[in-house]
């Protein structure tokens, strides 16, 4: 390595380490070192004089020093810094001019003409071929944001990179075309794949937003779910209460038939007839009301297409479709799910008619418990009265 290259390397390292804005996450010392490394790789594949190779390597070291003064016209600023430094080092004026032309060849839209210009141009974009391209690219996007130059979304950045790969950039040297182009093509495929993934994510988000807008609000879903659960729970409670009364009255009647009725054949037990009849009658009435409270209503189980089209039938209640053919019911359900209003209407009707059934059940249960309670009280009173006035002792006294 020549003395001038060592001095230039030291100069650039100190300059970029001390004077470069830390927001330059991409155009920093690491980038310059990468460009120098890839410049050497290209130079090894070319037949150039040592003097030309030295000039190209110097240009690689100095090409981004202008960023220490800002992003605007940084190539021209880099040329100014390079010229001042190399002149101080007494470098040949003709070689300095060549180096400046090489630096200007790294500008984004510059078209290199000579082989040295093509070499440094390819070296400056060598990151397009690397496995780490996606990470490096994100550093550049963040750099542009931090510097207030541009603020790309992920999708916009993917589009800009794909456009760069397809339309704006190409390799110029034979070595880069043969050895670096496959890596660039692979990264392009990665970008396209990411764009497709981004598009799929966007579609999913759009569908989610669409269905969120079209489907019932979570609060409405919770309302119907909780209300329906409460209705079913209340119906279970009513059935349980009715079953309890049925069991109790069945036991009472069984005991009455097995213990009291046989005793009525004895004339001395005549006083038990009326209390027993009252007792049994009230128990039978209670059982009848309990049965009525739990007895299911059988509906027609059929509907017509006109009923569905006019939204008259509630397809959520089995009693409206249990006699229908499967294909007719499937058609009706498909019509239901197409119409959000019909869904709401069906759910509302379901809750409403469940409420009517609950009202009937609880009214009958109230009457059942009331009659059972009255029956118990009246029966006990009747037993007491008839025992006092028509009991065995009263009968014996009258006979005496």
Image: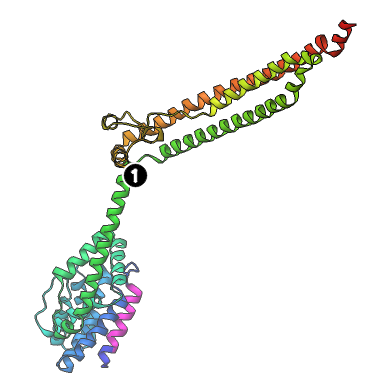
Q: Which residues make up the magenta segment?
A: 6-19
Number of other residues with Cα within 10 Å of mark 1, as a class: few under 14, some 14 to 19, many 20 or more: few
Of helix, strand and loop, which mostly describes the magenta segment? helix
Outermost residue toward the right?
400
Residue sitting nearer the eye, 177 or 375: 375
Q: In which quarter of the image is the C terminus?
A: top right
Q: Does the magenta stretch include residue 18?
A: yes
The residue positioned 21% from the left and 76% from the top of the image is 184
Residue 81 can be seen, yes or no: no
Residue 346: horizontal and vertical position, in percent? 37, 33
Here the colouring is: rainbow
The residue positioned 12% from the left and 73% from the top of the image is 110
Relative to 306, does residue 70 appear above or below in the rendering? below
The residue positioned 73% from the left and 15% from the top of the image is 273
Q: Name which quarter of the figure residue 316 lies in.
A: top left
Image position of 111 (left or right of 29): left
Image position of 9 (left or right of 47): right
Q: Name the residue under label 1.
A: 212
Image position of 308 (left or right of 163): right
The residue positioned 59% from the left and 20% from the top of the image is 367
Q: Name which quarter of the figure residue 365 lies in.
A: top right
Residue 212: horizontal and vertical position, in percent? 34, 44
């Amino acid at each position: 390595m020549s003395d001038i290259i060592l001095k230039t390397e030291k100069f650039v390292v100190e300059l970029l380490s001390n004077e470069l804005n830390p927001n330059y996450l991409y155009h920093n010392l690491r980038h310059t070192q990468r460009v120098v490394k890839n410049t050497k790789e290209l130079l090894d594949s070319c037949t150039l004089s040592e003097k030309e190779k030295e000039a190209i390597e110097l240009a690689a070291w100095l090409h981004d020093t202008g960023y220490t003064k800002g992003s605007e016209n940084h190539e021209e600023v880099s040329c100014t810094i390079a010229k001042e430094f190399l002149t101080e080092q007494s470098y040949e004026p003709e070689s300095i001019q060549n180096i400046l032309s090489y630096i200007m060849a790294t500008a984004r839209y510059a078209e290199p003409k000579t082989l040295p210009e093509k070499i440094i141009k390819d070296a400056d974009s060598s990151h397009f071929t690397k496995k780490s391209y996606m990470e490096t690219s994100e550093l550049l996007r963040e750099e542009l944001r931090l510097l207030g130059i541009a603020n790309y979304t992920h999708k916009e950045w993917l589009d800009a990179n794909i456009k760069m790969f397809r339309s704006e950039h190409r390799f110029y040297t034979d070595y880069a075309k043969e050895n670096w182009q496959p890596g660039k093509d692979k990264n392009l495929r990665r970008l396209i794949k990411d764009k497709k993934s981004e598009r799929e994510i966007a579609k999913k988000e759009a569908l989610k937003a669409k269905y969120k807008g079209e489907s019932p609000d979570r609060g409405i879903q919770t309302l119907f779910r909780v209300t329906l659960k409460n209705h079913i729970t209340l119906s279970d409670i009513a059935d349980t209460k009715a079953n309890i009364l049925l069991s109790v009255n069945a036991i009472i009647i069984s005991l009455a038939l097995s213990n009291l009725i046989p005793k009525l054949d004895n004339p001395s037990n005549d006083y038990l007839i009326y209390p027993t009849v009252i007792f049994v009658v009230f128990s039978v009435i209670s059982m009848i009301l309990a049965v009525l409270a739990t007895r299911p209503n059988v509906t027609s189980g059929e509907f017509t297409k006109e009923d569905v089209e006019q939204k008259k039938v509630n397809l959520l209640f089995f009693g409206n479709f249990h006699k229908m053919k499967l294909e007719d019911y499937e058609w009706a359900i498909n019509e239901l799910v197409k119409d959000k209003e019909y869904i709401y209407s069906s759910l509302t009707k379901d809750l409403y008619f469940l409420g009517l059934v609950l009202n009937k059940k609880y009214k009958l249960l109230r009457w059942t418990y009331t009659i059972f309670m009255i029956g118990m009280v009246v029966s006990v009173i009747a037993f007491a009265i008839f025992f006092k006035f028509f009991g065995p002792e009263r009968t014996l006294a009258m006979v005496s």
